[in-house]
Amino acid sequence: MAEGSVRPVEEADRIVVARLVLELWGAHTGVAHGEVFFPASLPGFLVEKQGHVLGLLTYAVANHQLEIVTIDALRRGRGVGTALVDAAVRQARTTGCNRVRLTTTNDNLDAIRFFQRRGFKLTSLRPDAVREARKLKPEIPAVGEFGIPITDEVDLERWVAPRQ
């Protein structure tokens, strides 16, 4: 169980979401599979405790799938990320989506492990896709976690049964 409570992002949260996205992602945009996202304008979920944000997830819905655009647990190891994923899966089912998907980069070993442990499967690898992504978001660093060059996009997805 998460340390705080999960709730949908509301219009009044947009400034906080924009600040967090800029602070955590280095820009107001996110890029995946050639598409530019503006997380502060997307639906999402916050985890809060006593007025403090502990986590944020933003998502987009299209073609019967919910795509996690950003996910951040500001305190790791306390169930915040799991609570956010669970909220996204519930939202996917409620809106009739048949899967939850996300894109990360090859260096993000912690995320790849985290999502696989929560039922997600690796579905595709786009070698050198980050070279194209940098044309849309030059802030993407050359080297990521563990000193690994950031070069490839990795997709993960989890099939969900829509609520009947």
Image (cartoon, rainbow, N blue to C red):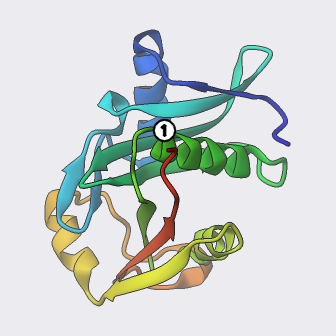
Q: Is residue 120 left or right of residue 124?
A: right
**Label 1 crowd (10 A; few <14 / some 14-19 / many >=20):** few
Most extreme residue toward the bottom is 127
Residue occupying image coordinates x 65% and y 48%: 86
The foreground one among 19 and 93 is 93
Q: Is residue 24 left or right of residue 84?
A: left
The answer to whether any part of residue 24 appears in the image is no
Residue occupying image coordinates x 68% and y 66%: 118
Check disc 1 and report its element: helix, strand or loop: helix
The residue type indicated by label 1 comes to Thr
The foreground one among 44 and 53 is 44
In the rendered image, the vertical position of residue 97 relative to residue 43, given as above or below: below
Q: Considering the image in quadrants, where does the N terminus appear?
A: top right
Q: Is residue 59 left or right of residue 32?
A: right
Q: Determine which quarter of the picture holds residue 8.
A: top right
Position in image of residue 146 (x %, y %): 61, 80
Most extreme residue toward the front is 164
Position in image of residue 84 (x %, y %): 63, 44
In the rendered image, the vertical position of residue 50 relative to residue 100, given as above or below: above
Position in image of residue 79 (x %, y %): 80, 48
Residue occupying image coordinates x 38% and y 67%: 141
In the rendered image, the vertical position of residue 4 relative to residue 37, given as above or below: above
The answer to whether any part of residue 152 appears in the image is yes
Name the residue beneath numbered marker 1. 94
Q: How many marks?
A: 1
Position in image of residue 110 (x %, y %): 65, 72
